[in-house]
Image (spheres, coloured by chain):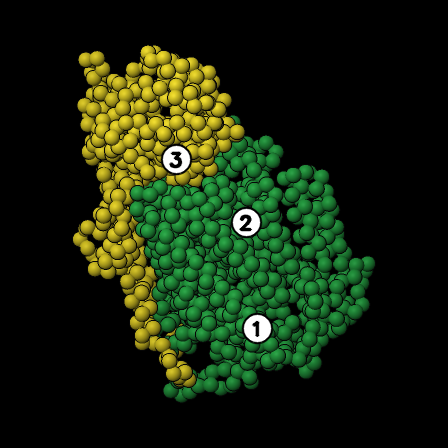
């Protein structure tokens, strides 16, 4: 795939040729920064592209100059005669001070205009149809970074009066999910980004630039996807051991699908019927509920963790990835990827480096194979698998 | 070159209880020396050693990232290695290699006998070495730092980084920072106070000018990092919570402090290289530097503006949009003085008669490669674009084009250029050219593809990546390139060894191998211990060149004197020089004990502290030297007013 920057006007053959060669092999670059799928990312791209071309022009100017100097002024013959000695030229100096300054003034103005646009927010609302009663929701999502996964919290009554200053003790939210943020396409989503431990950075390249998640601070940001689709992201502020394994996705769906998703997510977990699942639920209660939450089963946890939280599992099965967005829940055909899930339950530190002994990350629970089977049976009752096309689009390697 | 060290002659009647060492040529001479040239060589050797260490760390990084899901290092070790790669290259390789050039050349370029405070100079070196040793001891004492060279809080706190690595980072860098601070004060005073008669500020070579700006940046930047490191040390070791928001601290405090130091640091690194190539390019173009005052003032402008751009490292950190806009603009406009420099170097070459010897190739390498780094810099000075690029490999590409393309190439230009000045023999120019081309190709193969990786969205500081994002090919290319760089370094080492072997038993090379321009070449090669036989009286910029060349009636350059006629022969005897001292190394040897004591067992700080205190007392009560010993220079210049004015009191501190 050729990044968009090269599909434009093709300012210079060299730049296009060079970069086409350089980037020619990216088959499916889901994190490509030059392939905007939303207004914010597009306005950034529209600023970057021309500046990049200017930079290429200056590059060509300097390299052509260097080449000409080598061609014309090199002395191969140990010529003892000195060239004309000149010490400088004030007019030239002024010229190459003023011309770059003027170029940069133009770039500055467009930077400021873009910056302003990126910091503006629009008032919008999504209609959510809960049991036939339509409510208006101004789309806002609280993004919480934690070693090494992301939590997304939806407060359907808005964020007014919601105290976000201490991310380790956030007020209960209507929907709490992890690693996959579901949003309505075509709507601007305001984000409030914070962290429970160290600094992380939230970044969905196709939709917008990144913004750090810092403890004790709430950073405003926004996202908007042009249309339904899955947009990949990766934590980009170094956050310790498993920094590379802290990924996320934004799943943009149609407003109707979004409304349906909200209704589904609002459901608490029920009591499982199968015997294995019931045994799994008992294991969950004795082992997992210390840190994890399943709405309708244990509404809070006394998580003895540095960050004081673990992913909410109420609708685990509605998420196609887990463990910081690095494992697939499902095979491409929609069946559960049981092998991976069992491996994770068997010895999670072996699957993803963490400091469980330092109360950061999930420890190995010491379950035997029968218990693991029971746990899988219970977990599969938590939430419903999304559609096959979502499973296909969200697949990670 | 007949003069031998004259120190023995001078210090034969020590005063007081402490006897001063009397020099010589063995290891005792190296550990007690206060000679700026020997200290320069010590800096150079240590810096090149750490450069190799940091290079090996770089190769490990590249091996880990060569293929998806790399397993060469593992996450924990990878984090330590990339942290130490950055720390080592910045603080233990690039800065001290610049210090090597500064120490060796500044006194020579301004016509001085030594730096202003010779013993302090020795302490600077030994303290730097102590800091470097402390940092690297972490490998065998519980784990190396794992929080990145930038050490963002709170990830470096005791909860999130429980190994002692970050303690080593905080204390090791504190020690090297003190060393840099002492060195910068010393060199600033030297440049301002110890110039030869007639050497006005605007007759100083551009190298000395850039070094002066660098030292002034250091004087103001090092205290900032010292404060930040103290906060970190107290947070980790004594339960302070400066960066903990739950008790009113702020995680961003560290970032501001670090980058208020960290961005001037970038110019601290690059300006010496700019200075070096500003000497090399005119020499090999056989023309004076184009626009000397503009070169000087653009360097000063960079020095000033460098203080107003730190938050461009923090565009996504959550500082407000007004701050982002302001720092975005200031960052863009710092490109102007930098661009002026690039164009002035090109104008210097334009119309010249250029000999593309190895030093010149490296210098042209700086002009072209640094330009790429500068241009990619403009593409993320526009802060909206930076929100896409920051913390991706695009940034890694950018700053390696600046630091490797701009600094390493510049330092290699300097090594090839001044090697005969320091060691009295040339490095092989042919091997040097091979060295350059291998390095150039390897460098571009390594860091060029990182632009693409970054734009494709590959994050920095990740120990592994999954297949399927399009990262595979260019990571492999980059790894191959890194081994070409390693090959080029090996070629340099071979060149050093072969040239030294070839030169053994030979007479030193001639006094002026490059037909050079500035004052250091007035002394014979290698430089005698007393530098100048008689302190030169300076009449113009490019003094040395003007002593060799004049112009005829048509304005053509004609030689008026051969280099042999102009250069001194180093035969002066009885020159009053500062005597060596044991105490700088004793002082510095106490510092690692204090650092290790703070980390592991406070009792260990006692012997460390005693060593330091003892060294300070001994230093104070050390006899100055024999007041009756020989003063002045060559006998037949007794009474020469101009010369006597400046040579009389050799600096002793």
Q: Element type at marker 1? A: helix
On the question of residue A275 being in view, the answer is: yes
Residue B387: quadrant of the picture: top left
User: Which of A199/A221 is in front?
Assistant: A199
Task: Report how far apart the C-alphas of labels 2 and 3 lie in the structure.
Answer: 35 Å
Residue B490, image x, y percentages: 49, 64
Residue B637, image x, y percentages: 66, 80
Residue corresponding to mark 1: B500
Q: Mark 2 lies on which chain?
A: B
Q: Mark 3 lies on which chain?
A: A
Q: Name the residue rendered at 29%, 31% in the picture.
A: A331
Residue corresponding to mark 3: A246
User: Contact, CB < 8 Å: mark 1 with mark 3?
Assistant: no
Residue corresponding to mark 2: B222
Q: On screen, A303 above or below B340?
A: above
Chain B colour is green
Q: On screen, B221 above or below B500?
A: above
Q: Mark 1 lies on which chain?
A: B
């Amino acid at each position: 795939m050729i990044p968009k920057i090269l599909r434009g006007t093709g300012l210079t053959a060299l730049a296009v040729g060079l970069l086409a060669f350089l980037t020619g092999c990216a088959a499916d670059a889901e994190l490509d920064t030059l392939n905007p799928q939303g207004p914010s990312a597009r306005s950034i791209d529209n600023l970057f592209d021309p500046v990049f071309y200017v930079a290429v022009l200056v590059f060509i100017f300097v390299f052509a100059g260097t080449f000409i100097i080598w061609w014309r002024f090199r002395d191969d013959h140990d010529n003892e005669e000195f060239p004309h000695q000149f010490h400088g030229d004030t007019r030239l100096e002024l010229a190459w001070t003023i011309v770059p300054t003027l170029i940069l003034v133009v770039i500055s103005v467009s930077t400021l205009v873009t910056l302003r646009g990126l910091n503006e927010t629009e008032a919008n609302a999504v209609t959510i149809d809960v049991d036939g009663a339509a409510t208006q929701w101004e789309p806002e999502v609280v993004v919480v970074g934690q070693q090494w996964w992301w939590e997304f919290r939806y407060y359907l009554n808005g964020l007014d009066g919601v105290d976000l200053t201490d991310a380790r003790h956030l007020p209960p939210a209507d929907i709490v999910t992890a690693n996959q943020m579901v949003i309505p396409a075509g709507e601007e989503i305001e984000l409030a980004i914070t962290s429970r431990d160290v600094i992380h950075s939230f970044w969905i390249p196709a939709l917008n630039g990144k913004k750090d998640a810092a403890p004790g601070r709430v950073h405003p940001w926004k996202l908007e996807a042009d249309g339904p689709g899955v947009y990949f992201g990766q934590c980009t502020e170094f956050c310790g051991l498993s920094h590379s394994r802290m990924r996320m996705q934004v799943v943009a769906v149609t407003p109707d699908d979004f409304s349906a998703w909200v209704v589904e997510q609002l459901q608490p977990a029920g009591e499982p019927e199968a015997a294995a699942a019931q045994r799994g639920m008992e294991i969950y209660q004795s082992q997992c509920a210390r840190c994890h939450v399943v709405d309708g089963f244990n509404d809070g946890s006394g998580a003895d963790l540095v960050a004081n939280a673990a992913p909410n599992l109420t609708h685990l099965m509605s998420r196609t990835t887990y463990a910081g967005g690095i494992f697939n829940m499902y095979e491409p055909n929609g069946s559960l990827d049981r092998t991976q899930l069992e491996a994770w339950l068997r010895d999670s530190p072996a699957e993803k480096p963490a400091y469980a002994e330092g109360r950061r990350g999930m420890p190995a629970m010491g379950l035997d194979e029968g218990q693991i089977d029971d746990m899988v049976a219970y977990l599969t009752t938590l939430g419903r698998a999304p559609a096959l096309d979502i499973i296909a689009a969200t697949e990670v390697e | 070159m007949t003069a031998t060290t004259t120190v023995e002659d001078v210090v034969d009647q020590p005063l007081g209880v402490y006897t001063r060492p009397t020099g010589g040529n063995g290891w005792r001479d190296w550990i007690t020396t206060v000679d700026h040239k020997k200290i320069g060589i010590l800096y150079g050797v240590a810096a090149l050693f750490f450069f190799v260490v940091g290079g090996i760390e770089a190769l490990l990084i590249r091996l880990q990232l060569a293929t998806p899901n790399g397993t060469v290092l593992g996450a924990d070790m990878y984090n330590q290695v990339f942290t130490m790669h950055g720390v080592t290259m910045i603080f233990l390789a690039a800065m001290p290699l610049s210090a090597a050039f500064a120490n060796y050349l500044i006194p020579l370029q301004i016509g001085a006998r030594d730096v202003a405070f010779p013993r302090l100079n020795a302490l600077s070196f030994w303290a730097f070495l102590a800091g470097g040793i402390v940092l690297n001891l972490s490998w065998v004492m519980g784990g190396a730092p794992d929080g990145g060279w930038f050490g963002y809080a709170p990830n470096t706190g005791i909860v999130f980084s429980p190994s002692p690595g970050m303690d080593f980072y905080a204390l090791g860098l504190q020690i090297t920072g003190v060393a840099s601070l002492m060195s910068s004060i010393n060199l600033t005073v030297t440049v301002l106070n110890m110039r030869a008669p007639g050497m006005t500020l605007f007759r100083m070579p551009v190298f000395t000018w850039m070094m002066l700006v660098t030292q002034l940046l250091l004087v103001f930047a090092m205290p900032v990092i010292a404060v930040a490191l103290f906060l970190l040390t107290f947070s980790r070791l004594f339960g302070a919570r400066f960066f903990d928001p739950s008790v009113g601290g702020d995680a961003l405090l560290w970032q501001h402090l670090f980058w208020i130091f960290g961005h001037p640091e970038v110019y601290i690194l690059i300006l010496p290289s700019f200075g070096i190539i500003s000497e090399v390019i005119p020499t090999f173009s056989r023309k004076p530097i184009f626009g000397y005052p503009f070169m000087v003032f653009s360097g000063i402008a960079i020095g000033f503006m460098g203080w107003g751009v730190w938050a461009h490292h923090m565009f996504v950190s959550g500082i407000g949009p007004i701050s982002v806009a302001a720092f975005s603009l200031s960052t863009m406009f710092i490109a102007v003085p930098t661009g002026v420099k690039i164009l002035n170097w090109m104008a210097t070459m334009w119309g010249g008669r250029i000999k593309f010897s190895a030093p010149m190739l490296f210098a042209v390498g700086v002009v072209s490669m640094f330009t790429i780094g500068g241009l990619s810099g403009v593409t993320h000075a526009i802060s909206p674009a930076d929100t896409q690029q920051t913390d991706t490999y695009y940034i890694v590409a950018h700053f390696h084009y600046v630091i490797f393309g701009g600094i390493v190439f510049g330092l290699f230009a300097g090594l090839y250029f001044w090697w005969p000045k320091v060691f009295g023999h040339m490095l092989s120019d042919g091997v040097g050219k091979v060295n350059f081309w291998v390095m150039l190709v390897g460098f571009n193969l390594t860091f060029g593809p990182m632009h693409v990786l970054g734009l494709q969205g590959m994050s920095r500081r990740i120990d592994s990546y999954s297949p399927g994002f399009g990262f595979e090919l260019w990571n492999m290319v980059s790894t191959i390139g890194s081994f070409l760089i390693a090959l080029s370094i090996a070629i340099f080492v071979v060149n050093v060894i072969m040239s030294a072997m070839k030169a053994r038993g030979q007479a030193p090379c001639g006094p002026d191998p490059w037909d050079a321009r500035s004052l250091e070449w007035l002394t014979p090669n290698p430089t005698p211990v007393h530098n100048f036989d008689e302190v030169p009286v300076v009449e113009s910029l490019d003094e040395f060149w003007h002593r060799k060349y004049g112009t005829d009636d048509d304005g053509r350059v004609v030689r008026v004197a051969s280099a042999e006629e102009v250069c001194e022969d180093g035969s002066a005897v009885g020159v009053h020089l500062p005597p060596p001292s044991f105490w700088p190394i004793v002082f510095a040897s106490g510092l690692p004990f204090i650092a290790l004591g703070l980390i592991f067992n406070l009792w260990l700080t006692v012997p460390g502290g005693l060593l330091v205190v003892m060294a300070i007392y001994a230093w104070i009560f050390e006899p100055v030297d024999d007041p009756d010993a020989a003063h002045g220079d060559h006998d037949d210049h007794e009474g020469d007013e101009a010369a006597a004015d400046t040579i009389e009191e050799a600096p002793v501190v």
